[in-house]
Amino acid sequence: MKIKDQAPIKKIVMKTKAKSDLKPEIAEWWKADDDMKLAGELCGTAAYLKTTQTYRMRQLAVDVRLYCGLSVYSYAGSNVSRLDQTKTLPEDRPTFNLIQACTDTIVSRFAQSRPQPKFLTDNADYKQRHLSQQLNQFIVGEFYQTKAYDKGVQVLRDCCVMGTGALKVYEDESKKVAVDRVMITDLFVDANDAVNGEPTQMYQLKLMDRAKLMAQNPKSAKIIAGADNAYPDNQPDTGRTTADQVMVVEGWKLPSVPGAKDGRHTIACVNGVILDEPWEKDSFPFVFIRYSNPFLGFFGQGIATRLFGTQLTLNRILYTIARAITLVGVPRIFQDTRGKTPTSHHSNEVGVIIKYDGTYAKPSYEVAPCNAPELYNERDKLIQYGFQQEGVSQLQSSALKPEGLDSGEAQRIYNDTADARRAETEKKYDQLFIDLAYKITDVAMDIAKRDGKYQTVYPNKDGTKEIDLPAMKFLQDPFVIQCFNESSLPRDPAGRAQAIIERVQSGMITIKEGRRLLGNLDTEQMERLSNASEERIFKYLDDIVESGKYTPPDPFMDLVLAEQLVVQYYNLYVAAKLEEKKAQMLRDFFTQIQTLKMAAQPQPIQAQPGQPTADPMPNAQSPLIPNTNAQQGAAA
């Protein structure tokens, strides 16, 4: 068989940039074996990324200025601050800040909720269930001491304005878990490394007080003391300060594969290395929330970027309207030049008599039309389209309700419908606290492994309670974490009270449960008194199950409810492999309740000797039925 001649195959040559073309100071810093080399390569890499990502700094500066009219600092090394101080329109122009209205409306709606992460077990025994309860208390305590909810609101605003918000979880100088809000202008990732949204390297630039940095890193005090002063940007006025600050670069390199030893975490300044340690975790110590997820890359897109064109067009229209009103929209006097009426008669005095020659027309006062109606219509449409694009109700931004929407139930349905448009953002806000719970627990476990223990204060109705994290053995127990809001009831007090009242009236919940759900200050004392007996029973049973502490029941508690609850506790925890000693305490508790109930029953009246016994059949009391005994006595 003869094979036909084939055309020669062309070779495809892919030209790539040789690694040797890169500057030596931005090489793979995590492979450096010398401290000075490590510091130089880390700082050089951060400076290189900052120089090549000036476009991102410029966009963030514009976003912040569009939101609040203020400039955002861009740490030394770029001229973004000069670009940020340019003025495109006069300061005295009228404006409607559509970006700020959308952002503040979303933040104010989400700030009313406090997502609370819950550790849930999957087909676990009693010990694991008890462990999950302790973890829930631990997370509540850590959220309280780190002020996580307050910082979460700040990060939510950052993501709405700049596209991405970040929280950093780390160990502070007091050997406790700390959570800080981090400006996204301080974080840098390589664009190629983060093209799929999962970078392996991350860098943070931060200005730190020299004395505080030396106190946190006493072993590197000489290096920190010799570092040059640093300032927020390169403007001359920024050097006029009493602060003594040092520019610090912190870099993370994730392990190439789980369990690899090539991960590294380094903190350095231009004068040397401050901290250098291996990094074995598979993620960075940050929790991120993005307003709009990018198709490519790491950083998200915010409201300011999405509404940039709309806001500029709206500003120009408002400026045009204002100029037209100033130039044209004033009263003007038209007077015939042939008339002899003196112009001094035209004044702002009341009751002025103006004399004019009747031969000619008298002076007339006119106001010319300032703007075409289409200009005002275009202004209103731009505002409406901006709100619609971000899923924000224009009425909600003004704290108004639609006309005719007077029913409480109708208003709640309207609010729920409006919130459905932002369901994705709400899920991201909930996920922020789920990720934060993981990070906090992870850092706390590292501290516990090193120091032997880690305790946090859990605030509850009985005061405060210390939770010992090492006893939980978190890493050895399987947990599934889910996030639930504090309540699915309406957020506003009036709507919440009305919803609870409707559920009580329909019989879905009891009055006691309704008092508990209200949670208002005016009903706090009534709620505590009404639920005191039930809470005491729960405390006694929890003490038995958790610590084996036994407190016998007494006649002052609700014995019927106590009997019901102890049976439920026994069936629940015995099936979950409760220790026999504690199970016997529950049985003893049940037995003593039965004894107290028998003692509380009235004893039957016993007849005394010689006294007539009571007639077992009661005498008829109705006048329609004759008294048989009385008739028999009369007959006798």
Image (tube, helix red, strand yellow):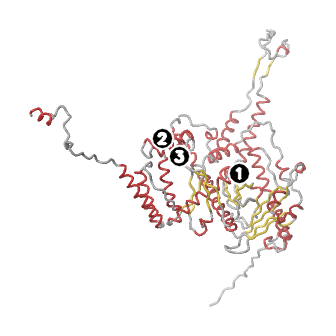
Q: Nearer the viewer, residue 122 or 471?
A: 471
Residue at disc 2, secondary structure: helix
Instruction: Point out residue 394 in the picture as x, y percentages from the top left corner.
Output: 63, 40
Q: Please, what is the three-letter code of the amino acid marked with disc 3?
A: Leu
Q: Is 420 rendered above or below residue 320?
A: below
Q: Nearer the viewer, residue 390 or 410?
A: 410
Q: How many marks?
A: 3
Q: Is 351 left or right of 156, judged from the image as shown? A: right
Specify which label sits upstream in the sequence, 3 or 2: 3
Instruction: Point out residue 136 in the picture as x, y percentages from the top left corner.
Output: 58, 58
Specify which label sits upstream in the sequence, 1 or 2: 1
Q: Residue at x 70, y 36 (%)?
A: 375
Instruction: Point out residue 152 in the picture as x, y percentages from the top left corner.
Output: 67, 52
Q: CA distance from mark 3 to mark 2?
A: 12 Å
Q: Please, what is the three-letter code of the amino acid marked with disc 1?
A: Asp
Q: Which residue is mark 2?
A: 501
Q: Residue at x 44, y 49 (%)?
A: 557
Q: Which residue is mark 3?
A: 489
- Viewer-nearest of discs 1 and 3: 3
Instruction: Please state, as top left, top right, bottom left or bottom right, where the N terminus lies in the image.
Output: bottom right
Specify which label sits upstream in the sequence, 1 or 3: 1
Q: Which mark is residue 339?
A: none
Q: CA distance from mark 1 to mark 2?
A: 38 Å
Q: Which residue is mark 1?
A: 158
- Viewer-nearest of discs 3 and 2: 2
